[in-house]
Image (cartoon, helix red, strand yellow):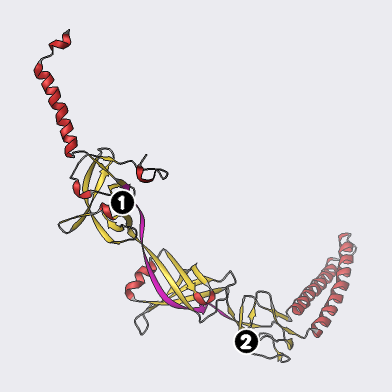
Amino acid sequence: MTLCRVPFFILFIGVFSCNNASDDQQSGTTKYVKIEQVKGGQQVERLLFNGRIKEKSLTSLSFRVGGPLVSFTLKEGDRVRTGEMIAAIDDRDYLLNLQSAKAQYEQLKGEYKRYKELFLRKKVPENSFEKVESGYLTAETAFENTKNQLKDTKLRSPITGYIHEKFAENFQTVSAGQPIVSIIDLSVLEVLINVSESQLLKIKEAKESYVTVKNANVTRVPVKISSIGEKAKEDGLFEVKYVLQNDRDWEIYPGMSAEVMVHIKNENYLVNISSGAVFHENDRDYVWVYDTLAKSIRKREVEVKKIATGGRVEVVRGIEPGEMIVSAGVYYLFEEQRVIPIDQPSKTNVGGLL
C-alpha cells in the first residue's frame, strides 16, 4: 500500500510537531483565566452643609372695605390654610346696601327690556332708549359692587401659613386698606447655607441637591438654587438660597435646622473591580485587559482611588465600564499572552463541581 511508503523523516517531523505543541501548552503559553466585566458609573462627590429654614415671603393682609371687626380670634403663631377665614367685619350696612342696589337694578332692568322692545319696533326715539340703557348699566354695576363689598367683609387667607403678627383686635373699627395681620407663607420656604469660595463653583455646577429637616421627619427632598450672594459676607462665606416646595403639608417652620447634600458629578468614571485584578510593578498599579477578538491580554496602568468593601477596589482612571479584565492569578501572566476565559459556574452548581 502507498501508506507504507511514507518517508520516515516526514513521520518524524509530524511526531515532533505534535510533541512541541503539547510542550507549549504544558509550559503555560495559553492560560485559563478568570475574567470579569468592568462595571461602574460616573463619579459623584457629595458635599454636606448645615443650614436653616427661612420663610420666602411675609404677606400683610387688609380689608377692601371698612367697619368694626366682629370675628378676629386668631392668635399669633396659629396656622391657617388657603381660603380659611381670618377675620370678618360687621356686614349689617353692606346687606342693606345690597338690598337697595338689587331693588334699583331689578326696576331698571324691567324698564330697559320694555324700552328695548319699543326701540326695535321704532316706537321710541334712540336718545330716550340710550338714557334708559345707561341707567340700567349703572344700576347693574352698582349691584355687582355691593355684592363684592358684602363678600369683602370676610378676610380669607390667600396662602397656607401661620399668623406672624396682628395689627388690630376684635371689635376694633378698621378702614379699607389698613393692615390687619401678617402671614408667613409656608407653601414655599427657603433653605439658607453658607459656602466657601472654593465650594461656590462646585455648588453652581451641582446636578442634584437634597435637603433634610430631621426635626420635621423630612428626608432627602430635592431642592433648587434660587439665589447666590453676589459678594462674600464678613466671615468670607457666600450665602446660597434653595427653594423648598412645602406641598406635602410638612411641619416645617422658619428657624428650623436643615442639612443640604449636594451631588457633584465629575467627568471621570468610578469603577469597582476585584482587588485580585490589580498587580504592582515599579510603584504603579496595572490590570490585564482581555481582548475578546485576539483572545489575548494587554497590560494597562490604572489609578486606584481606595479599597472598597468585599475585596473590591475603586478605580478612577485607566479602564472604562464594559471592558473585560483578568480578575485572578495576574502575577503569572505576560504581555499579549493568549488566554481562555473560565466559564462561570451556575448558581445551582456551587463550587463548579458539575
Closer to us: 64 or 298: 298
Image spot of residue 252 (x, y percent): 55, 76
Q: Does the magenta stretch include residue 77?
A: no
Pointer 1 residue: 320
- Quarter of the rendering containing residue 93: bottom right
Asked if one can make out residue 124 in the rendered structure from this viewpoint, the answer is no
Q: What stretch is highlighted in magenta?
A: 36-58
Residue in view at x 86 percent, y 60 percent: 120
Pointer 2 residue: 76
Image spot of residue 54 (x, y percent): 50, 79
Residue in view at x 19 percent, y 47 percent: 332
Which quarter of the figure is the C terminus placed in? top left
Image spot of residue 147 (x, y percent): 78, 76
Residue in view at x 82 percent, y 73 percent: 135
Closer to us: 115 or 164: 164
Main SS category, magenta section: strand
Closer to us: 194 or 326: 326
Local crowd size for mark 2, using a 10 Å CA cut-off: few (<14), some (14–19), many (≥20): some
Image spot of residue 57 (x, y percent): 55, 78
Indicate the amino acid at tag 1: Glu
